[in-house]
Amino acid sequence: MSDPTPPVATAAAACQDCYKCVRECPVKAIRVEDGAAAILAEQCIACGHCVRVCPAGAKRIRDDRGRVAALLGASEPVYVSLAPSWVSEFPTLTPGQMVAALQALGFAGVGATAAGAQEVSAHCAELLEREPGTWLSSACPAAVAWATRYTGLGARVTPLLSPALAHARLLRERFGDTIAVVFIGPCIAKKLEADAAGDELAAALTFADLRAWWEEAGVDPTALEPDPEAGFCDPDIAAGALYPLEGGMLAGIRDRCAVTDPQLAGFSGMRAIERALADLSPEDGVSRFLELLACEGGCVNGPCTSGTGGTVTRRGAVLAAVPESPSTALAPRRIDIAARIDPHPTHQPRHDAAALRRALAAVGKRGPEDELNCGGCGYETCRAFAAACLEGKAEAAMCVTYMRRLAQNKATTLLHAMPSAAVLVDSELYVVESNRAFLRLVAPDGSLDDRWEARPGLAGASLPKLTDCWKPFRHVLDTATDLVDRDLRQGERIWRVSVFTVEPHRLVAGILSDITAPALRRQEILDRAGAVIERQLDAVQQVACILGENAAESEILLGSITEALGGAEQRLPGSTRTERER
């Protein structure tokens, strides 16, 4: 029964908005919203590349173990169709141990998907002899989904079941129509195939699912003693065992096909497939068969493999497991594996030039010179990104150059709006940027105005040449420890300096102010206040004498005021007046 849950989904909380999945998705079936990448199930071909490349592990594969466990709990037996790439994924297990470990989970028996692959090869060879022309293989469900949805070549996919479905049909022929068949392999797209297959293929598990199941069930395959009477259901799978390798299907049909080798070609990896078929015309009168595998190197590098071992090692494991030369491909067993391949193209919106220009302008790209095509957003070109924005699949924040420019503009605006002098300095004490308040602070006479006009912000100027107050900047660069409100003297002027780390040991920011002038104004106020107090004291004493009253109390009070004001003056930087002068 079809599962409405897509095979791959994104855990939004784990997504780090790196856009790597967008970059790797061959059909751009991803919508980025609020920085999180959501997979568009109706466009996804389940190739699984996004799963392999996601650095945060945010792509989650649907776990179908629950569905399979329910099948095992039912009355009818359940058989496994095991992908031939298992020998490269579990190189330490013997066939007997693998069968025993699967039977320990409750499966009635284990068959090799290679038997279905061998059947497909033989039928395909007959098809090519009977109906010359351009044909694409039906073995890889991800490649078939791509061909039928995103190209005009869907009608050229061979009208045959995939090896997994062909094998399911062979098992049902042998053990009865009431059995259930579960595929286990490295492929995510097989889950789509099982969803669409109805009762033919009940479910698809990945190698990762199998490992997790063994661990939960406490099954150690290496510790099991194989039953000498138990084994794979399929005795002769030589030709089909090569299917996990690029060119493996071709080896199975070569001796039975009338076309010559140059007309048989294999391509693995979606980018290689796209390039290979870019200008292909099925109407050119050439007979050819193209084996298409979505994963580079073939199924041995499927998205649900452990990733250990290189392609050569994995390929070698598969070749070592083939019991005999694949040239002895068996004749078809004459079961019906014909399939109806219906092209169902995915709608590809078209955008006029004016709409694209507006979308580009929204991210600051107003001419061809602004279209850097850096690929930071995950799209090959700026125009492809603009089209994705129009389709609601991308957002402006994905454009790295736009966001950098926006951040720079905001920082510059804030810097120049500050009333205090501010300056950014690099590790060599060269000015990165500063505001006009800093210019006026270091050159109040206007001597640097021409340089400012030539290089706004005094960019590139040496800080030690602009001011003697450069040592706090050097200290913060060396120690990455901020300094706050340090008073430094430069000649007759006193500067208050705060220096903060922006990038440790690489970039620091300083805020400076000249506190000399405010100190002088406070000194003038104190001088005037002192003179007023002295005059008032004289007047009070004269009045006291006339009235015969004691003015001592007033004198003490006024003296206290003077002392208080004098203390405030002492706390001012640079104050040198003596108590007597006050």
Image (tube, rainbow, N blue to C red):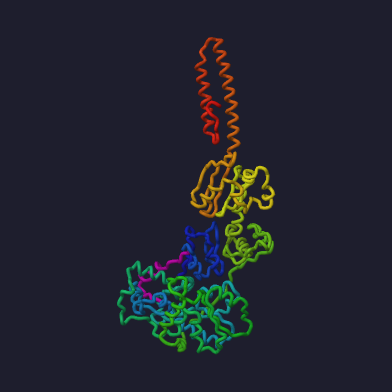
148 displayed left or right of 190: right
Q: Tell me the residue at 35%/70% (across/down).
A: 214
Q: Nearer the viewer, residue 190 or 383?
A: 383
Residue 62: % across, % down: 45, 66
Instruction: Please say if 150 is above or below 403.
Output: below
- At horizontal 54% and vertical 85% (from top left) the residue drawn is 127
Is residue 158 something that shows in the picture? no
Q: Is residue 404 above or below residue 110?
A: above
| Residue 70 is a magenta residue | yes
Pick whichever, 507 or 137, lies toward us. Answer: 507
Residue nearest the observer in this picture, 3 or 28: 28
Q: Position of residue 492 (x, y in %)?
A: 59, 39
Q: Which corner quadrant of the image does residue 582 belong to?
A: top right
The answer to whether residue 181 is left or right of residue 292 is left
538 above or below 191? Answer: above
Compare residues 410 and 416 and report the one nearer the observer: 416
Give the quarter of the figure containing the N terminus. Answer: bottom left
- The quarter of the picture where residue 406 lies is bottom right
Give the magenta range.
Answer: 59-81
Residue 340 placement (x, y as % from top left): 53, 78
